[in-house]
Image: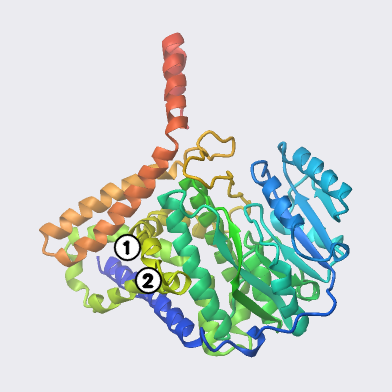
Amino acid sequence: MVILTIVYGVATIFLAVYAFNAWVLTFFYLKYRLSAPMVVSPPPFPSSFPPVTVQLPIFNEALVVNRLIESVTKLDYPTDLLQIQVLDDSIDETTDMVRVLVEQYQRRGINIELIHRYDRTGFKAGALEKGLARATGEFIAIFDADFVPNPDFLKQTVPYLLADAQLGFVQGRWGHLNRNYSYLTAAQALAIDGHFTIEQTARNRSGFLMNFNGTAGIWRRTCIESSDGWQHDTICEDFDLSYRAQLKGWQVLFLPDVVAPAELPPQLAAFKRQQFRWAKGSIQCLKKLGGAVLWSGLSWSAKWQALIHLSNYLVHPLMLLLALITPILILNGGTANIHLPLIYLSLGSFGPPMLYAVAQIALYPNHWRKHYRIMPLLALIGGGIALSSTQAVMEAFLGVGNNFRRTPKFNVASPTDRWQNSAYRLPLDWLVFGELAFSFYSFWGAWLAATNGNQFAVPFILLYAFSFGYVGGQGLWDARLDLWHWLTVQFKQHETHPSVARQQFMKPR
């Protein structure tokens, strides 16, 4: 019990550190939002433009690839200086669709080409690496399949790269094509607004390391090459390269007013897959680059922020650990041995909600409350995906696999659009049963706390209960059609061949 008490205390302290850092980043944002460094001052418009290559890495994107390519061909940039590469690793009808589209645009005089790979070696990093070998541009812009860049994106970003030879990349802010599609997409939009508006601005303008977000940005080609190029030993190749570039002395820039709209995942399983990839990839980057950060010439504050940034997804295993051991401690009286000032540590948990509120006020001063009212759901989702993200973190630390699992796109914008019948929808995530089990376990823990004189802990334990319950329940609801189909097949099989059905059911798994 003493060991569990120590573990509880250590986990609580670390969670408080991560939560308190939201206050820190919000402070730096408020401090520097009106006093940007010199590099952010708008440079003069160039008299001549440099050649630019736009790379579009895609994999099985039949529902959105037309939208993507159409938007990129409308970029306001001299046609003779613009090269468009469609980096296609698809194994479905997407490749045939892209081939037709590329030929159509080529006939219109647009410099666009299809680069199709028959294997996915290196996944997205491998595709970008292959495209770079054939690129003619001095600068390389990247857009994922779910993005629809505005026509002026290049004219808003290229001048900064021309004005500062030490500037390695420029990152734009993600906008939202389907924020109002559902409660889930509204919650995601709130989180993304907070990340870009507050976190990226604060890191960039405070002199801390900032990550490239994989898309809606533009690189200096020599920066990529001098930083040892795209590497695929992590599944967050963007995080990896951007940190390596900055450790080599390259400067970076985030432009919050340059917005590229994108589609948010409407399926909870798709969102969890996205978070799984980001969690695993960032911890892989921590293992790979943590030592380099510590031994770099950065200030101690920059090193600290970099390590917090790289390890941020550790909050999920810490949350899962607390959810697991808290009822055990209550049941065995272990909470009596905890003398930490938990009331003060818990104040840190208000950091993220404050960060998101400040972001909404900055972006939408006249109707920020309309967007912010989804904050309770975001809190539930953030806690509820802890089991999935913990699996990702453990895989990263143990070096288990390196498979890049894409986030499916459905081309949904209006609430009447449906993704449920799409061939790209994800099957049931069996972790939902673990999440529901944790929900019931946490409800039991809340009851224990209420009946054993630990009323202060009840709200926190109930947050776990509702978080796991929502994510698990929503996962089941999203997969209801697949579950119904499975049950129907099993019933028909049982009616036709009861002995076979019984053997299938009882077969060891």
Query: Where does the image place residue 49, in percent across and percent down from the top left?
Result: 83, 74
The 10 Å Cα crowd at callout 1, few under 14, some 14 to 19, many 20 or more, is many
In this picture, residue 118 sits left or right of residue 331: right
Residue beneath the point at 39% across and 65% down = 318
The answer to whether 173 is drawn above or below residue 341 in the figure is above
Query: Where does the image place residue 328, in percent across and percent down from the top left?
Result: 24, 58
Q: Are marks 2 and 1 in contact (CB under 8 Å)?
A: yes
Residue 306 visible in the snapshot? no
Residue farthest toward the top in the current orientation of the protein: 496
Give, as a three-letter code, the residue at label 1.
Leu
The 10 Å Cα crowd at callout 2, few under 14, some 14 to 19, many 20 or more, is many
Query: Where does the image place residue 188, in percent across and percent down from the top left?
Result: 46, 58
Give, as a three-letter code, the residue at label 2.
Leu
In this picture, residue 123 sits left or right of residue 501: right
Query: Where does the image place residue 317, in percent across and percent down from the top left?
Result: 42, 61
Residue beneath the point at 57% across and 70% down = 286
Residue, disc 2 = 15
Query: Which residue is nearer to you in this view: 290 or 91?
Result: 91
Residue 100 visible in the snapshot? yes
In this picture, residue 118 sits left or right of residue 431: right
Residue, disc 1 = 322
The answer to whether 204 is drawn above or below residue 509 in the figure is below
Query: Which residue is nearer to you in this view: 10 or 177?
Result: 177
Residue farthest toward the front in the current orientation of the protein: 366
For label 2, the SS is helix
